[in-house]
Amino acid sequence: MNFTNVDPAHLADPGLSQGALVSGADRLLFITGQAPLSAGEAVPEGFEAQCRLVWRNVLSVLHEAGMSVENLVKVTTYLADREDREMSSKIRQEILAGHRPSLGIIITGCWDESWLLEIEAVAAA
């Protein structure tokens, strides 16, 4: 699989990819919205703990499919509160370690009121 960022000069933002072009992929993985849940555990308190758990869940799905963050081509984050944008961005950048898939952030209510975010993603290999 070949992954190329598509960043027109007039839309350039060093922290954001405007598009992700994938060619030569044999497999696509659509990751359902991951919530701050872990088997047998309560929903963590606070945004940072929830965000790290959600990313752990995303990474777990990728791993089960034989993929990693480098295979992510699209990530959509649903935030319950606009105030959590900066922490979400900081943790995402830490997890992705320089990889820049196409991103979307939507401020909305989550299915469960105790959830502060959900993340869904698409990966290709």
Image: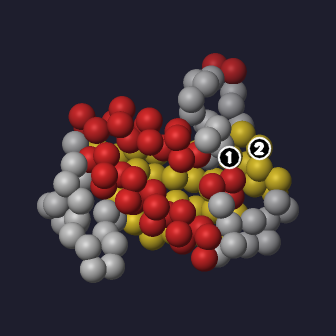
Q: Residues within 10 Å of mark 2 (few under 14, many from 20)?
A: some
Is 119 situated above or below 41? above
Is 39 situated above or below 125? below
- Farthest residue to the top: give it: 10
Image quadrant in which you'd find residue 11: top right
- Farthest residue to the left: give it: 113
Residue drawn where x is 61% and y is 70% of the image: 63
Res 117 visible: no
In the rendering, at what x and y percent does residue 1 appear? 82, 60
Three-letter code, disc 1: Ala
Which is nearer the N-term, disc 1 or disc 2? 2
Residue drawn where x is 61% and y is 41% of the image: 97
Q: What is the C-alpha distance between the residues marked 1 and 2?
A: 6 Å
Do the numbered discs 1 and 2 sit on residues whose CB atoms are within 8 Å?
A: yes
On the image, numbered disc 1 is attached to which residue?
A: 20
On the image, numbered disc 2 is attached to which residue?
A: 4
